[in-house]
Structure formats: structure tokens, C-alpha cells
Amino acid sequence: MEFLTERRLSDGLRAAEQGRFRLAIIDTPPAAGPQAYTAAQAADLVLIPCRPSLVDLDAICRTAQLVKSAGKPAFVVFNAAPHSATTLLEDARAIVEGVGLASCPVILRERSAYRASWPLGRTVVEVEPGSKAAREISELKDWLLSQLQVCTPEDMQNRKVVAVDG
């Protein structure tokens, strides 16, 4: 993993391409600022993590404008969703679609496994591989790879991840 500033993003992506890497993941600060726009312009696909709450969904309008101006496909990934939040998720999807974005079909629910793995600096797949949280992450990974159509789960081994450090 290599952390890059906004100014070095293009160089980092070019180096990854020359190194024959087929996937780069760019992680930006949560605000829809210049770093996010630069990353969106370089991306093939934009994922926008968002809790299904009015406070979090309020910020989606600016992000939607940013993604539209970059001309890239984007999906909102709902995370930390309460277990029995069917109506809440339906309303959140309607808000997201209302600003011209699509929602990812995989929902990441509020689970204790996420809180337990975070202080260890590990993923839920590593800490609790048989958990519901690990299954959700695996489903998200499979869905994402199918959207990108660039690599299979087997291709993911030994790949470099490029992240933007705000």
C-alpha cells in the first residue's frame, strides 16, 4: 500500500499501470473536495460509503454533483445499516436516486464484528471469517469485481492498492 497526495496521484497510477497492476483503489477524505474530484476523474468506478441516515444523506448532493462533473459511474454503498431498517433503506435509496446516483445492492449492516476488528487493525474477514459481516464484505468484493470486469478474486492476490491521503 502506498499513500499519495492529490498531486502525486497521476504518477502513482501511472507507476501501478507500468507495474502491470490491474486494480488501484483510491481512498479519499470523506468530503467532496478537490482530492475527491481528482480521484473521481482518475477512476473507472466510484463507490460512496454512506450511512442510511438523513445527516449522512444530506452530504450526498455535493458528492453527486462531483461525480456527475467527473463523468464517472458511481454507487452509494450503505453501511452501518440497522438490521430491521427496510423502510429506512427504501427512503435512503429514493434520496440517492433523486440526486442521480445508484445504490449498491449489497448492504453492510451494523455488526459488532466491525467494531471488534478495527482496534486490531485487521478486517472482519481475518478476525471472524465465518461471520455475517465477513460474508457481506465478500459479497461487496464480488459485486465490485463484477462491476469492474477487470479481475477475478484469484487475480486479486499480490495486488497493490493506491490510496489518496488527504
Image: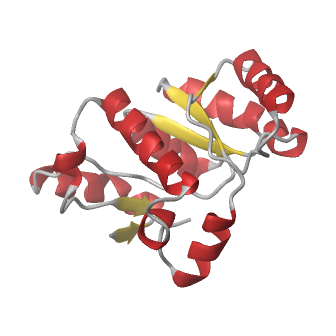
Q: Say if 16 sits above or below 145 in the image.
A: below
Q: Residue at x 60, y 41 (%)?
A: 48
Q: Which one is nearer the viewer's eye here, 30 or 117?
A: 117
Q: Say if 138 sits above or below 123 in the image.
A: above
Q: Which one is nearer the viewer's eye here, 130 or 88?
A: 130
Residue 2, quarter of the rendered image? bottom left
Q: Position of residue 76 (x, y in %)?
A: 62, 34
Q: Residue lying farthest bottom?
A: 120
Q: Say if 46 sits above or below 93 in the image.
A: below
In the displayed structure, does residue 156 sit left or right of residue 122? left
Q: How is the image coloured?
A: secondary structure
Image quarter in which the C terminus is found: bottom right
In the displayed structure, does residue 19 sit left or right of residue 27? left
Q: Residue at x 43, y 33 (%)?
A: 45
Q: Position of residue 130 (x, y in %)?
A: 46, 59
Image quarter in which the N terminus is found: bottom left
Q: Which one is nearer the viewer's eye here, 5 or 111?
A: 111
In the displayed structure, does residue 129 sit left or right of residue 14? right
Q: Position of residue 65 (x, y in %)?
A: 67, 28
Q: Residue at x 51, y 79 (%)?
A: 121
- Tally of marks: 0
Q: Residue lying farthest right?
A: 54
Q: Position of residue 26 (x, y in %)?
A: 43, 53
